[in-house]
Image: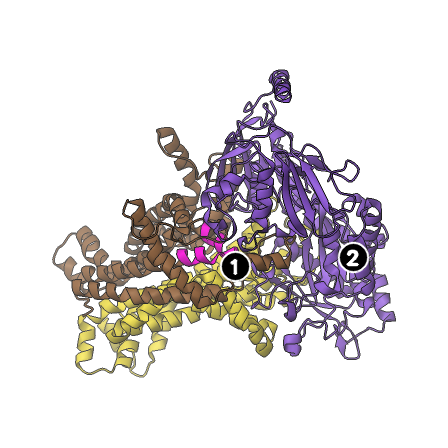
Amino acid sequence: MTETSMDIQPQRSQWLDVWDQFKTHRGAVIGMLFFITVCLLVLLGPHLWPIDPHTIDIRAKNQGPTLAHPMGTDQLGRDTFAQVLAGGQVSLAVGVVAMLISLFLGSLIGVLAGYFRRIDGLLMRLTDLFLALPLLPLLLVIIMLFRDTLRASFGPNAGIFILIVFVIGITSWMQTARIVRGDVLALKEQEFVLAARSIGTPPHRMILRHVLPNVLSPIMVSATLGIANAIITESALSFLGLGFPSDFPTWGRLLFDSTNFMTLNPERVIWPGLAISLTVLSVNYMGDGLRDALDPRIRGR
Amino acid sequence: MLNFTIRRLLFTIPTLLFISFVIFFILDAAPSDPTGNLPLTIPPDVREKIRESLGLDQPMIIRYLLWCKQFFVNEPLNLLAQWGINIGDPDRLRVISFQTRSPVVDLIAQRMPQTLWVVGMSYVVGVLIALPIGIISAVKQYSWFDQMGTFISMIGFSVPTFFTGVLMIVIFSVWLGWFPSIYDTTLVVDSWRTLGLQIRQMAMPVFVLALFNAAQISRFMRASMLDNLNQDYVRTARAKGLRERTVLLVHVLRNSLIPVITVIALGVPQVFGGAIITEQVFKVNGLGQLLIIAIQGGDIPTVQTLTFIFAVLIVLFNLIADILYGILDPRIRYD
Amino acid sequence: MKLKSLLLGAAASLALASAAQAGRGDSGHLNIIYWQAASIMNPYLSGGTKDVDASSMVLEPLAHYDENGNMVPVLAADIPTVNNGGVSKDLTSITWKLKPGLKWSDGSAVTAKDVVFTANYCMDETGGCQQLAKFADVTKVEALDDLTVKITFGKPKPFPYGPFVGSTTPVIQARQFADCKGIKAPTCTEANFNPIGTGPFKVDEFRANDTITLSANQNFRDPDKPAFATVTFKGGGDAASAARSVLETGEFDYAWNLQIAPEILAQMEAKGKGKILAGFGPLVERLMVNLTDPNPKWGDERSTVKHPHPFLSDKAVRKALSMAIDRTTLVEVGYGKAGRVTCNVLPSPAIYNSTANDSCKVQDIAGANKLLDQAGWKRGPDGVRQKNGVRLSILYQTSTNAVRQDFQALIKDWWRQIGVETELKNIDAAVFFGGDQSSPDTFQKFFADIEMYANNFDGTDPEAYMGSWKCSEIPSPENAWLGANMPRYCNPAYDKLVAEMAGTADINKRAELAKAMNDMLMQDYVIIPLVWRGNVAARANTLAGVRLNVWDSDLWNIADWSREK
C-alpha cells in the first residue's frame, strides 16, 4: 500500500484512483458494459425497431418467436420485442430513480440516527411508523390526494412518473436506514473514529470521510435489491390504477401479464423476467466493483 | 442495558398509540368501501343503510376511540374471561369484522397455524440457507461458488413470487403431479401419514418464499463478511496463530452479524404479516390473505387490528435487534 | 294423521325404489373451489355471490329459478299466480303455501312463522340487511296458519316474486336468529356461520374467508339425497388457479366464475380431466357514455347535468364510437365460449331480447368515418377530429381486470382509426365500485368520458333494472352520487315507459315495454353494449348432475349432484 501511494502524484484526484481500481474488477466492467448496452437498447431500440409496441394485430396473437416477431407476440398480437424495449425505458428509469431516492433517504436517516444519539430515538420511531403503515391503503390515499394535482402540473406521463418514484422511494427506505444505523453504531466506537474525533474533526466531515465509506457495502446491497424491488413494485402499482396506463408496457407488467400464458406461450414469459434479472445482476456487479474501489484497504491490492 | 430496555419499553406505549392512530387515519381516508365488492344489483340506498349499520356514519375520531376501547379493554377482558376470570359485563363488544361479522381476534387465531407453518418455516429455511452461503461466498470471493450464489440470489430476488409460484405449480402439480396445488388448511397433523401430506403441501410455498428470503439475507451476510475480512484485527488474529476456522467463525462472523441481525429482525414481523402473494398463489389462506381480503373489502376493523399487531411486532423486534447489537459488540452503548 | 302416514309411506317407497340407484351419501366427498372465499353463511348480511352461493347449500328459499329462468317450488308447495289464486287480483298480495312435513336440520318443523320472522329480520332498518331491495314495498308479512304466509304490498306488484324467490332471500330459522335482529345482527357469529337450514347440507366447520366443511343434512326432505356425504368448499386464489385445479390437476370437482383468457381455458380443458360449462344470464359488458362534462374546471358541478358534454352530447359521435367496435373480436379475445355478440343492454331472458339494433354486430369503420365527416368533425393535423376547437379526445376508465385492459387496448385502436384519441385509465375494483364519497374514481362520479363495466339483475324480471335510466336516478352531489343512471340520460318518453311497466301485469305486454326501453337506450347510443357475458364454470368429468344456472346460485341443485362411476 505504501508503494502505490508513493507512485501517485499528489494532485491526482481520488476519483481517478477509484476509477482505476474499478477498471481492474472484471465483473464490474462486464456489468457496466451490459448495463450501458441495456440502456442504449431501450433508449434507441424503439426508434430502430420498426414495430410500435401498441400495434395490435389480432390475427398474429400468441405467436412463438418468428423472424417478424423475434420474441413472439402477446394475446392481442402486439410484438413482445417492441414491448420489452419500450417497457425497459420506464422500468429502468423508475428502478434507478426510486432506488436512489430510497437509498438517499435510508442512508441519511440511518447515518444521522446512528451518529447523533440525541435524534436516534425519534428517527427510529419514525422508521417503525413507516414500517408499520399499511401499504395498500396508503397508496390509495396517495393516489387520491396527489394524482390529479401532479397530472395537472407535470402532464400525464411526467406526473405519474414523479408520483411512482416518490411512492416507491418513500415506502422502501426503512430497511436501508436500519442497517446503516446498526453499522454506524458499531463503527462510531472504533478506534479510528475516536481518533479522528479527538483531533476535532467536525461532524459533517466525520460522516462524509470516515463513516459513509465504511458503511458502503450494505448500501450497495440495498441498491441492488432496491432496483429489483422498484421494478416489481411499479407493476403492482399499475394494478391499483396508480401506475402508468394499462397500454403502457413495463417489464414488471409484461411479466405479470404473461404469467397466465406460461403454458401456452413460454417464450413470452422468459424475456421480461430475464431482462429484470440480468439488469439487477449487472447493477450488483457494478456495486461490488464500486465498493471494492472505494475501500482504501483493498485499493491497490 | 436493562435500564435502556425498560426505558425503551415504556416509550413504546405512546409510540404504538400514535402509530395506531395514524393507521386508522389512513384507513379512513382510503377510498375503499365495505360495499364495494357487493353485486351491482344491490341498489345505492340499501348500500347507504349497510354503511350506517356498520357505524360508518359516525365521525372518524369516535370510531377510533371505539376501536381502542374494543381492542385495548374488551379483548383482554374477554381473554381473561376465557380463562375463567370474569370482570364486568360479559356482553361487551369485541372488535368485529365488517365482512364476516365475527371477532377479528378469533379470525387471526384461526389463521396463525398455516401462516407459521408456511411463512415461518420458509423464513427459518431461508436464514439457514442464507448464512452459510453468505459466509462461504465471502471467504471464497469470486470463486465459482460465489458467482453461482450471486447469480441464483439475483434471480431469486428479481423474479417475483407471483411468477415463481405459478411456475412451480405448472411443473410440480400439473406436469409431475408430485405436490398439491391447493393448500388444505383443515388438515390436522396427527399421524405420520398426515405429516407427510402436510410436508407435501408445504413444499412449494416454502421453497418459493425461502428462495426469496435467502437471496436477500445471503447478500447482506456476504457483504458484511467481506467488510470484516479485510480489517486489521483479522490479520492480528491470524498472526497470533489462531486457526482459520476460529478466526472466521468466532471473530469475523460475530462482527459481521449486525446488519444480518437487522435484516432478520425486520423480517420476523413480516412472517406474521404473512406473504400475501405466495399465500394467494398456493391458497394457503393465512394472515396475508386475511389482510388482503380485508383491505379489498374495506373491512377497517380487521385491517386496523392486523396492522396494529404487526406494528407491535415491528417495534418489539427492532428493540430486540438493538439489544442484540449491544451483546454482539459491547462497545455499542445507548445511554 | 292420515296425510302423514301417506307421506311417510310414499317417502319409504321412494327410498326403496332409488336405493338400487343411489342413496344419501353414496357418492362420498365433493370438492368445490370458489376463488373468492365465502365470508359468512348468511346472505342477508353479505350479498356477495360467493356468500349467497355458499349459503345456498344450507339455506333454501320458497322457490328457485331453474336454469331456464322458470320458477320451481322448493319449500313452497307450488308457485302462487293470479290464475291459481295465490296472487290477489289487484296484485297487492301473494300467498305462499309451504310443503307439509318440512324439517330444519335440527329436526324441528318448518312453519310459516319462520318465513314471517325472516321477512322481519331483513326489514329491520338497523340491521343493515343487504337484500332489503327484495322486500321493497312490502307492508306486511303474516302467517295465516302453520303452512301459509301472506305477503302484502303497499302498491300493486305486477311481479310479486321479490321476497323468498332465489337464493338471495332464503328462509332462516326463527328460533336460531331470535336474538339476532337489528343492531344485534352482526354479533350472532355462531348463527351466521352455522345457520340451521333446510338444504341438503349442514355446516360442520366454517372458517371465514377460507374453507367450509359440510356434511349431508340427515333431515333433508328427500331421503335419497344428497348423493354426497361431505363437501369441502374451498376459497381463495385466483380464477386461473381454480380452473387449473379442476381441469389440469383434478384436485377439485367444481370451480366457479372462471373469467380467464379463452385460449388458456381451452388449453386446460384439452387435458381431458373436466368440462367447461357456460350459461347466459342478463350480464352485459357495456360502455357508458357520459352525457355531461367531466372537465375539472367545473369543480363541484363536474359530471352533472348542468354542463352537457362538449362532444358526446352529439349523437353522431356516440353512434360512430359504437360503429367502430368489432364485437366479434372482443368476444373472441376476452370470452370465447363464454361470450356472445349483443347489441342490447337487455339480451335475456329471451322474451325481452330485441332484434331492432342488430346492425351493430358488424364493425363499420368506414361508415363511422363518414358519419363523423358529415357531422362536421374534421381531422386535424395529428389525425384527431375536431370541430370549433373541440377535439375528440376521450378519457376511458374501467376497473382493473386483465380482460378489461385488453378491451381498452382494442377499442382505443379502433377509435384511433376513426380519428378519436383515447387515454386509458384503470382503477382498483374496490375503489371503482366502492362508492366512497371522497374518492374521485368511483363509477358513479364518472369523472371520465367513457366507462366500462358489466351489470345485470337478479332473477328474471327486468323492471327495476330498466328503471335505472330514469331522470331521477342520475347521480349528483345533491343525492350523494347515489343513483344508477351513469350516462346521466334523461328522456321523459323513457320515464313514461318505466311508469307504464310498473302498472302492467301481462308478461307479453311487459316484454314489449322492456324492449321499447332497451331500443330507446340503444338508438340514442347512451349505452354501448359490447359483449353478452356468460357465467363460466368447470366441473370434473366424474361429477354428474350439474346444471349451470345463471338466474340463481351455481349450487342451486347440489342435492342432485353425484359421482359418476
Instruction: Tell me, for residue C369, which label it has, or none.
Output: none
Disc 1 residue crowd, few under 14, some 14–19, many 20+, Cα 10 Å: some
Q: Colour of chain C?
A: purple
User: In this rendering, would C525 be left or right of C304?
Assistant: right
Instruction: Tell me, for residue A236, which label it has, or none.
Output: 1
Q: Is residue C129 visible?
A: yes
User: In this rendering, would B191 be left or right of C553?
Assistant: left
- Residue closest to the eye, C30 or A277: C30
Where does the image place residue C546, in percent across and percent down from the top left?
A: 65, 33
Disc 2 residue crowd, few under 14, some 14–19, many 20+, Cα 10 Å: many
Asked whether B319 falls inside the magenta stretch, the response is no
Three-letter amino acid code of the residue under disc 2? Val
- Name the residue located 57 percent from the left edge and 45 percent from the top edge: C43
- As helix, strand or loop, the secondary structure at mark 1 comes to helix
Q: Colour of chain B?
A: brown
Q: Are marks 2 and 1 on the same chain?
A: no
The residue lying furthest to the left in this view is B240
Q: Is residue B143 visible?
A: no
- Name the residue located 36 percent from the left edge and 46 percent from the top edge: B116
Where does the image place residue B317, in percent across and percent down from the top left?
A: 29, 58
Above or below C201: residue C129: below
Q: Which residues are magenta?
A: B290-306
Name the image quarter holding residue B139: bottom left
Figure quadrant of the N terminus of chain C:
top right
- Residue closest to the eye, A250 or C199: C199
Q: Colour of chain A?
A: yellow
Distance from label 2 to label 1 (Cα)?
44 Å
